[in-house]
Amino acid sequence: MRTSLNPPLCRIDAIPEGGALAAEALVDGEACDLLLTREGDRVQCFHNVCPHAGRRLDWAPGRFLIDKGLLVCAVHGAMFRRGDGECVSGPCRGQSLAVVAVEVRDGAVHLVG
């Protein structure tokens, strides 16, 4: 059985269905701002950094704009799919948010590794 040295990022039910939640964690030994999305039992995690300008996506700390199912960067309006982080509209179209591997165990979201 695998065990994680990292504490859970959050409980899965803390992530709004179809929405996003901010978290902080050590990733490869570096403190990082993260963004978690959820659809049902599926959780995706990304670095909370827009590939266009290197700025956070949230419009206020931990507050994200979702428009027609897409995550919207508060700075320049780039729009990202929540499932894979690909930018489908805006100045960084075709680029993607950096993925951080997570898994759900016992109702909690953990970093993988």
Image (cartoon, grey):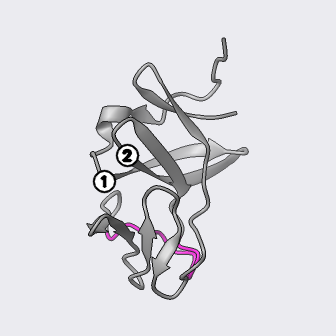
Quadrant location, the C terminus: top right
Extreme residue toward the top, this view: 1
In three-dimensional space, the C-alpha distance between marks 1 and 2, rounded to whole angstroms, equals: 6 Å
Q: Nearer the viewer, residue 40 or 9?
A: 40
State left or right for residue 39 relative to residue 102.
left
Q: Nearer the viewer, residue 68 or 27?
A: 68
Res 17 quadrant in image: top left
Inspect the image, locate mark 2, and give the three-letter code of the amino acid beneath it.
Arg
The structure residue drawn at horizontal position 47% and vertical position 69%, both measured from the top left corner, is: 56
Q: Which mark is residue 108?
A: none
Residue hosting label 2: 38
Inspect the image, locate mark 1, and give the three-letter code of the amino acid beneath it.
Gly
Residue hosting label 1: 19
Q: Are marks 1 and 2 in contact (CB under 8 Å)?
A: yes
* Magenta stretch, residue numbers: 50-59
Residue 94 to residue 83: above or below: below
* Residue 97 placement (x, y as % from top left): 56, 65
* Residue 84 placement (x, y as % from top left): 52, 58
Q: Secondary structure at mark 1?
A: loop
* Residue 85 placement (x, y as % from top left): 51, 63
Q: Is residue 99 magenta?
A: no
* Residue 99 placement (x, y as % from top left): 60, 55
Q: Main secondary structure of the magenta part?
A: loop
Of the image marks 1 and 2, the number of the one nearer the N terminus: 1
Residue 55 to residue 38: above or below: below
Circle 2 residues within 10 Å: few <14, some 14–19, many ≥20: many
The structure residue drawn at horizontal position 37% and vertical position 46%, both measured from the top left corner, is: 38
The structure residue drawn at horizontal position 36% and vertical position 76%, both measured from the top left corner, is: 74
